[in-house]
Image (cartoon, rainbow, N blue to C red):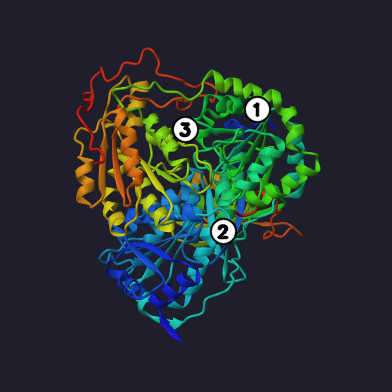
Amino acid sequence: MRVREFFQPDDQRMEHIISILVENKFGVLARVAGLFSARGYNIESLSVAATLDPTTSRITIVTVGDDRIIEQIMKQLNKVIEVLEVVDLTETHFLDRETALIKVHTKPEHREEAVRIADIFRAKIVDSSLTTYTIEITGDVDKVEALINMLKPLGIRELIRTGRIAIARETTRTASPRREPALLKS
Amino acid sequence: MRKSGAEIFCESLRREGVKTVFGLPGGVVLKLFDVLCQQKDIELVLTRHEQGAAHMAEGYAKATGKAGVVLVTSGPGMTNIVTGLADAYMDSVPLVAFTGQVSTDLIGNDAFQEADNVGISRPCTKHNVLVKDVNDLAQTIKEAFYIATSGRPGPVLVDIPKDVSIAKAEFRYPDKISLRGYSPSMGGSKQHIRQAAEEIMKAKKPMIYVGGGAIFSNAADDIRELAEITQIPVTMTLMGLGSFPGTHPLSLGMLGMHGGYWTNMAMHHSDLLIAVGARFDDRVTGKLSEFCPEARVIHIDIDPTSIKKTFHAHIPIVGDVKAVLRQMNVMLRSMDGNPVKMRAYRAPWLKQIAEWQAAHPLSYKQDDKIIKPQFVIEKLFELTKHEAIVTTDVGQHQMFAAQYFKGTKPRTWLTSGGLGTMGFGFPAAIGAQKAFPEKLVLCITSEGSFQMNLQELVTAAEHKLPVKIVLLNNGVHGMVRQWQDLFYEGRYSASILGKMPDFVKLADAYSVKGLRALKPSEVEPVLKAGLKHKGPVLMDIHTDPFENCYPMIPAGGAQHEMMLEDPPELNRGKKGGAQKRKVDEGEGVLPA
């Protein structure tokens, strides 16, 4: 690697989905979030919940950065004592999903259109009032955003997204990173 | 037998081999202090400010390699040690800080002297824990010492609520622990080590660049072996000083912003850089894009986050410096690495470096009226025959000491590198002296830094710790004044310390011996008398307020573009700001 290649320009930034297995203790999330904020790294979305083993939780973070920043993020996460494993899913085959709840305005003349759009996206209408529908959609990020774009002309009153969760495909287990020496803990 | 939290705390310290605790009491830690004072084999050093306790523990830890222990109360007690924690985190100092916390039922209620100790210290500790259940206390303390001293060392904070220190539990101290998410790697990849050894043998212009990691891993002998069998010159960072004898023919001294001209030139022209426990700090590299442009880089570090953080590494080796160098030295020997053969191979490179050094050695203009700070350090180096533990504060005096006090042993150079904490030096010296009562401990400081923790004079006096304070008193924040001269057209904004205490009287007030030198001729008698005195001494040495520290890589400048002396257009203190400080006249306070 030449010196110049190491100092990459900004246009090398890519989105990464990082899956982090942590001990289920108070303060761990603050520590993980803190290491992003302390270095000025962005968190695009974050989701966290317990795993099958109630002593551990899974944090899924979507972040953006060039290779050098992502490498630092991975190493810094590995350094946190309560972090058990870190995987950059973007480097493997993975599935990702997000759920959104979208409350749309429905004037009488738009109610049918809203149902039709929801049908096309296999989204569900989970609540309705005289002037609104609440539509639930689960899918990859493209699908969720496509639906949002379709509903925008009707008027979206409220939009809640879960942030993305992701899992490795087939035999690659989400929990086992390819442990290169550079990713070992200190 | 069931024991109280406080008894568990003391018993756990004993199991960890703790002999000294630095601290200051308060409401919620009364129980801990009460039980602690009944322990015959653990001594408490009562400091006059919690920050002093933290830096003393740092000095103790840096000098011994063992974890320093701090015990302070909640709220202000804890916030006062934050600087010490941040300093220890930046310089990888093993520290275990115990803080008191309000009772668990009061946490979050804005109780008296409550602070979110864990929240406040999270970004400046390696790990921290609030102990909510006395049954977890022993395990937590064991883990704290293990985490603080293993891998890349660092500070760990254990927050103990008042009720936890009183509640009782069965005491079981674990012999061993394993943490699911923490297992520092030690050995390094064999394949990478072999690859590195091959490159080392081939390189024509290699450099060994050693940082503080080499000291924590006790690798001084291995570095010396590496340098000698391969005949590669060694440069050290501020934190790495002492890991290789400064007086060794292969030593190029410190590199970086105030490193030697020859050192930085050698770095710039090197074709192979062997970075050992160093982290390519900005004070070392200068402008990154022009740092060591020709060099292949071997980077050995126990912390993977240090590798490729700011600079590229062609051969990254994650592991303990000592363990890696041992393997590497065996390989190098088997590859026919030996001093005689390698000396011939490296001769042109070493000759080139010697020429650079001859062209621009470290130098200053001696004066017969005003004391030059470099002269004082040189004299000190000569008089102590380099046998001393030296602590420094931060600023010009620190750089002069790094340049002119060429330490020969690891753990004898204790300075605040990463955080650059003025006020570190004196308490650190007390901590080091506590660890080694028989050794000569020097605190090289300045009037600016010293005044930040001078209250600990009484701690030194009370515990009869004979620290020798060499105070280079130039009446200005020297490094700030130097930058203002060079980059702010000589406007001395807040860098001139207008009113100065009489340090000799101050020392006297604290039952510490005070001496003063005002003229160059007084330096030697004062230093001699100070070093000879049995107790703590404060030597107030009035130095040239306008001496600048060179060589210097201006901030953001490239490593080979050093300033070697004051530029001719330098226009001191002429353009507004405060007035020049008058040079002191008259006689010093000399030994009777």
Left or right of B522 on screen, residue A95:
right
Q: Chain of mark 1?
A: B
Identify residue type, mark 2.
Answer: Ser
Identify residue type, mark 3.
Answer: Gln
Label 3 to label 1: alpha-carbon separation: 22 Å
Left or right of B229 on screen, residue B487:
left
Check disc 1 and report the residue beneath it. Answer: B270
Identify residue type, mark 1.
Answer: Ser
- Tell me the number on the disc at residue B403: 3
Left or right of B266 on screen, residue B397:
left
Q: Residue at x 71, y 60 (%)?
A: A173
Residue B377 against residue A79 in the figure, above or below: above
Do badges 1 and 2 share one subunit? yes
- Seen from the viewer's position, the closer of residues B423 and A56 is B423
Q: Residue furthest right?
A: B335
Percent x, y of residue B259: 50, 30
Q: Quadrant of the C terminus of chain B?
A: top left
- Tell me the number on the disc at residue B150: 2
Viewer-nearest of discs 3 and 1: 3
Q: In what element is the residue under mark 1? A: loop
Which numbered disc flags the more N-terminal residue, 3 or 1?
1
- Seen from the viewer's position, the closer of residues B499 and B587 is B587
Left or right of B234 on screen, residue B530:
left
Is residue A147 visible in the rendered image? The answer is no
- Seen from the viewer's position, the closer of residues B580 and B440 is B440
Q: In what element is the residue under mark 2? A: loop
- Seen from the viewer's position, the closer of residues B522 and B92 is B522
Q: In what element is the residue under mark 3? A: helix
Label 1 to label 2: alpha-carbon separation: 33 Å
